[in-house]
Image (cartoon, rainbow, N blue to C red):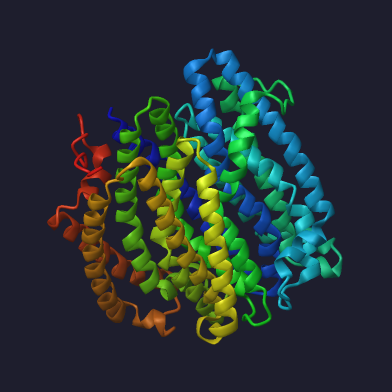
Amino acid sequence: MTEKRQILRSASVIAVVTAISRICGYLRDQRIALLLGTSGAADALVLAFRIPSMIRRMVAEGSLGASFIPIFAKYLRERPPSEAWAFAQKVFWDMAAILAVIAVAGSVFSRQVVYLFTLLGGHTVRWDLAVTLNRFIFPSVLFLVMAALAGAVLNCFHIFGLPAATPIFFNLTLIAASLGVVYGPLLARLPERLRTPAVPLALAILVGSALQLAVQLPALWRQGMRFAPEVSFTDPGVRKVGALMGPSFFGMGVYQVNLFVDTLFATSPRMPAGSVMSLYLGDRVMQLVLGSYAIAMSTALLPTMARQVAAGEYAEMKRTFAFALRVVSFIAVPAAVGLILLRRPIIQVLFQHGQFVAESTALTARALMYYSLGLPAFAAIKLITPMYYSAQDTMTPARVGAWALVMNVALNAFFLLALVRVLANGGPALASSIAAYFNFAVLFLIFRRRYGRLGGRAIARAAARIGVCAGVMAAACIAGTKLALAPVLLGAERHFLSQVAMLAVVVTPSVAVYLGLARILHCEELGELFLLFRRGDAEAAGGGAER
């Protein structure tokens, strides 16, 4: 099996499991939206979970893996298994000790934590409720990060399915908590000020987070980890991981930091009520695409790139990156076009039930449009940062991420002060999208200057073909929207299944047009996506990328 095929197979396993998880995540968010809508209680719940969620994404989708996997892979390659597992156990217990302190502090100082999100006013948020919810939720940081570490260890043994599946348990826990038979009896016993479904949902977040760690422990034991308690901050390997993790925590998670900034600006009194929840849901819908393949490819890439760097195969590493960028762009670009054009019917079908009314749909659709503009850049960042980390360079992405963060803050402030009547709650999403393109462009140029060409011409040719295919698809989508979705957009068609069917009538032919034109234009990425279904050596599929 070629290395390219191994990457695709690993990414496909992660993508399938992640897609299932995202579906469960949608059901979870749909239940929350149905119960809370875009009310002050909904904003309070999102605020309370934003910091733990941000830390989880920054760690689970990059930072911890980026710092731990290259070092652990080197231990496995060069040292006896006993030394490798001793190193892994030290990292495990060191992280547990640090996170336990952070979890307790976050709950004790809950009021100060929530205040970080309401510096600009936040008059539409139930502030006291957010403080209470944060006390329940913040300890989940411990379990979420430890689950990410467990997943990083398993990834080194090419076990991707189980770590990718852990959010399913989290989502199912919240779905269960959203049912009346679960939260109803609990609410009856709470004080009047806390009688909202947000409280049992907050408790479910903590329980679900613990489950994410628990389900991975047996697999770690089978691989050889014995969890012998040992805290050692002076171990050379542990210190190396710590030195790499600090910058990578920010560099890989700059998108999450920008979400934090977006949330802060969304609480401004100048923003419409429900802006926090609408931005959260807009991001979640975009994550259905970003998480389904871009993050899956990124997760599969890092162990491969780490091995290539350890063997001194820098040319192979660059070829691997160019291949991954082209394949992911082949998915991300048309997905972004589709989300922009169909934003309103998508949100209407997914969430417009119960307390989530037409005004909520309009708010969320606007946020989704501006986040979707940056989808290709968000996906590309997920691929280029592992290339730096495989070379054990975590500082450069951190520095570039800091510049992108400054740009995001400046754009948010400008949009809030000068264009809030035009952009409304879409301003923070647009600022993040622009900052993402800046972030990727600078990272690409810096790496090219240091290590040579990255196949830029081949990537540009692929981007041109993808752009043509996406443009024709957009025309088909617009035509289909006018014919099939008019009743949905006008609100005349209320039945859920009919709305889904009409949306499918537009999406299916549009996707067929895109894939058909890609075949006509001989897009290599189409063949590479189906590489798994071919037998024999498939190295030639995309091997002509220019370096």
Residue 311 horizontal/vertical position (percent): 38, 24
Residue 283 horizontal/vertical position (percent): 52, 63
Please tell me whether residue 353 is drawn above or below residue 256 in the rendered image: below
Q: Is residue 32 visible?
A: no
Farthest residue, direction right: 191
The N terminus, quarter of image: top left
Of 486 and 57, nearer the camera is: 57
Residue 426 horizontal/vertical position (percent): 52, 75
Which of the 4 image quarters holds residue 14? top left
Q: Is residue 534 visible?
A: yes
For the point 71% across and 29% down, the residue is 93
402 vs 230, left or right, is left
For the point 22% across and 44% down, the residue is 546
Please tell me whether residue 54 is drawn above or below residue 39 in the rendered image: above
16 vs 524, left or right, is right
Farthest residue, direction front: 449
Residue 502 horizontal/vertical position (percent): 34, 72
Of 377 and 223, nearer the camera is: 377
Which of the 4 image quarters holds residue 7? top left
For the point 54% across and 15% down, the residue is 81
Please tell me whether residue 93 is drawn above or below residue 142 in the rendered image: above
What count of labels does the image hold? 0
The C terminus, quarter of image: top left
199 vs 88, left or right, is right
